[in-house]
């Protein structure tokens, strides 16, 4: 007898599936901290709410935002802060494959070398590619879900990929946004990057998938110039071409018309030379940099003046730079401190750049160390205890228990160990300082892989307030190398040393850089160190806040290196104080690795 009972497929809808796929997205909302404001006048330096106003002007409650950190946490935090349905266009250029996207070419003096990824970037790479394509797709799926919630009702998302992962991600986009929301596949064709191969055709294109947040979203198609004017007979007149000349007969009747531009189609032929040739005006030396013309077409197609444009894998900052030039508001984010620094300088080079903020995420939830821990099913608390004990032992200290924020003791000083996948924050250090003060401990060493921006002199002051001598030390990458650990070659380095002086001339004040020392010279290859001519070669950027008030660094003067202007000033302009009084001057230095060091000075204006 034939069994006619129908069986139901477990899959309820069309989608892309892989082993262990999760559809519930982790949402960790963390507080934002504004660590620097740029191009903000003294009269408008007051703090603004994170999201206020809709007109895009600083006086109406908005500043553009450059955010350092893990973009999944950043997007969840933006949603928690009221950005749901507020962003008009999202463009992302996520890493296509492998870890090549995490190393960058740098120059020290006249020597070029490759800067490797930070430990946090390496962890992001392992999370993204550790299980191959499966983990990459899960990474992107989680973020697309959050982006869909951030987009306004008629917003668009543009996802830039190549042929290695593009076709998989197209199915993910159908799943998250709905196949009916698909608008276009844009082909970016770059004929000037020919790579010959006798066995296959050259790869000379990328793809950009365009989706709306609902099915009836329309694009504003851009016009592009023709290589040479085109003449068309009036009878076959193409209404999509711009008319510039109309030839008429003796009776005044139009015979033909001539055109110089046309509407773009979905194949954009834009050369790579603008970002790959060192003599090009756009060239920054950033490996994933894209030509500005691509973003110009994207932004003009999907936004109007004053709309908000976002890029959560911003790299060298092309999206924000073009949005700034086109009069759009922008939000950019990246996990790389170096990317944040490249973007900051790029924005400052734009004439009349509007004020913007540099933010990072505040107090992280404790994330647990899962690297190099043997065995399966180990409880999280045990994993964390192993990690803390491991680092404290390498520091040649002894592990202690019974404290919430203190993990070890060495030579009469207490030790706090930062998490492996998040920067050490000001609030984290304050918690450890409070615990030291409550137990009458007079010394604290904080060990960290990465550091929240702008910590150095701020936390030293906090330590002095509590009567605790504070030292910040970087955990070296070598602790991940079993051979180095076994050989006992692990050295912990204090953060960079900055020496500056204040010059006075009546009511005027000037800052002069005197010295800058990076204790861990192993960050720079020996052959490059030999080319260093002076200490200032390690300084990429520095700025001054003439009236630091203990909260946000307001960048009121700066000097920085660019490819066109590689020289760096070591003395600031003279600054005049309007009123007598005691002022705090904060000096911030960004080194060639993207790390910042601060120095707090006092000036008494009589």
Image (tube, rainbow, N blue to C red):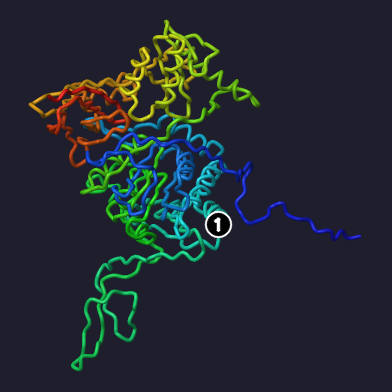
Quadrant containing the N terminus is bottom right
Number of marks drawn: 1
Residue 239 occupies quadrant: bottom left
Judging depth in this view, the residue of 516 and 245 nearest the camera is 516
Rate crowding at label 1 as few (under 14), some (14 to 19) or many (20 or more) other CA atoms within 10 Å: some
Instruction: Answer with left or right where residue 443 lies relative to residue 113.
Output: right
> Where in the figure is residue 41, as x and y percent of width and height?
22, 41
Whether residue 500 is visible: yes
Residue at position x 51%, y 64% from top?
Answer: 215
**For mark 1, what is the residue?**
174
User: Regarding mark 1 in the picture, which secondary structure is present there?
Assistant: helix
Q: Residue furthest top?
A: 411
Whether residue 269 is visible: no
Work out whether 553 lies above or below 271: above
Residue at position x 10%, y 28% from top?
Answer: 507
Work out whether 246 lies above or below 165: below
Instruction: Answer with left or right where residue 149 lies relative to residue 19.
Output: left
Residue at position x 36%, y 17% from top?
Answer: 463
> Where in the figure is residue 390, as x and y percent of width and height?
51, 16
Residue 342 occupies quadrant: top left
Judging depth in this view, the residue of 561 and 353 nearest the camera is 353
Judging depth in this view, the residue of 441 and 124 nearest the camera is 441
Q: Residue furthest bottom?
A: 251
> Where in the figure is residue 20, as x and y percent of width and height?
63, 41
> Where in the figure is residue 406, as x and y percent of width and height?
48, 15
Quadrant containing the C terminus is top left
């Amino acid at each position: 007898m034939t069994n006619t009972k129908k069986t139901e497929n477990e899959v309820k809808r069309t989608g892309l599936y892989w082993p262990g796929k999760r559809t519930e997205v982790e949402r960790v909302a963390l507080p934002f901290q504004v660590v620097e404001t740029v191009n903000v006048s003294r009269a408008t330096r007051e703090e603004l709410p994170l999201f206020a106003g809709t007109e895009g002007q600083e006086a109406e409650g908005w500043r553009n935002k450059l955010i350092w950190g893990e973009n999944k946490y950043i997007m969840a935090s933006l949603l928690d802060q009221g950005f749901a349905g507020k962003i008009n266009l999202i463009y992302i250029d996520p890493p296509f494959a492998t870890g090549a996207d995490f190393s960058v070419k740098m120059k020290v003096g006249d020597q070029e070398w490759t800067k490797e990824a930070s430990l946090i970037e390496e962890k992001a790479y392992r999370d993204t590619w550790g299980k191959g394509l499966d983990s990459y797709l899960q990474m992107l799926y989680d973020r697309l879900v959050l982006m869909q919630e951030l987009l306004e009702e008629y917003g668009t998302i543009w996802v830039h990929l190549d042929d290695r992962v593009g076709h998989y991600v197209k199915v993910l986009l159908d799943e998250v946004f709905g196949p009916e929301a698909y608008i276009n596949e844009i082909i970016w064709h770059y004929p000037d990057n020919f790579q010959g191969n006798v066995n296959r055709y050259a790869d000379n294109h990328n793809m950009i998938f365009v989706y709306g947040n609902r099915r009836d979203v329309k694009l504003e198609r851009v016009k592009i110039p023709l290589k040479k004017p085109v003449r068309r007979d009036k009878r076959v007149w193409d209404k999509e071409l711009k008319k510039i000349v109309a030839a008429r007969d003796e009776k005044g009747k139009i015979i033909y018309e001539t055109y110089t531009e046309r509407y773009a189609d979905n194949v954009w032929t834009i050369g790579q030379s603008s970002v790959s040739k060192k003599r090009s005006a756009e060239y920054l030396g950033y490996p994933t940099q894209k030509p500005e013309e691509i973003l110009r077409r994207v932004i003009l197609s999907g936004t109007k003046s004053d709309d908000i444009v976002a890029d959560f894998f911003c790299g060298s900052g092309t999206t924000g730079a073009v949005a700034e030039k086109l009069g759009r508001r922008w939000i950019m984010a990246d996990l790389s401190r170096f990317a944040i620094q490249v973007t900051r300088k790029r924005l400052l080079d734009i004439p009349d750049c509007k004020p913007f903020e540099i933010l990072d995420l505040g107090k992280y939830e404790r994330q647990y160390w899962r690297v190099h821990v043997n065995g399966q099913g180990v409880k999280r608390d045990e994993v964390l205890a192993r990690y803390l004990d491991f680092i404290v032992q390498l520091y040649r200290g002894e592990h202690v228990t019974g404290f919430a924020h203190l993990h070890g003791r060495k030579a009469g000083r207490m030790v706090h160990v930062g998490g492996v996948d998040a920067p050490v924050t000001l609030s984290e250090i304050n918690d450890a300082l409070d615990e030291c003060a409550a137990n009458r401990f007079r010394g604290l060493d904080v060990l960290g892989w990465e550091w929240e921006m702008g910590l150095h002199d701020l936390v030293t002051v906090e330590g002095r307030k509590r009567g605790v001598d504070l030292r910040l030390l970087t955990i070296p990458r070598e602790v991940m190398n079993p051979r180095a650990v076994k050989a006992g070659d692990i050295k912990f380095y204090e953060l960079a040393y900055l020496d500056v002086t204040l010059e006075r001339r009546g009511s005027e004040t000037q800052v002069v850089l005197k010295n800058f020392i990076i204790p861990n010279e192993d960050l720079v290859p020996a052959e490059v160190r030999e080319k260093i001519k002076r200490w200032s070669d390690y300084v990429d950027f520095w700025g001054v806040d003439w009236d630091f008030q203990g909260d946000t660094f307001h960048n009121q003067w700066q000097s920085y290196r660019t490819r066109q202007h590689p020289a760096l000033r070591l003395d600031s302009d003279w600054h005049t104080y309007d009123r007598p009084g005691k002022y705090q001057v904060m000096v911030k230095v960004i080194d060639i690795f993207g790390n910042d060091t601060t120095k707090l000075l006092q000036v008494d204006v009589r």
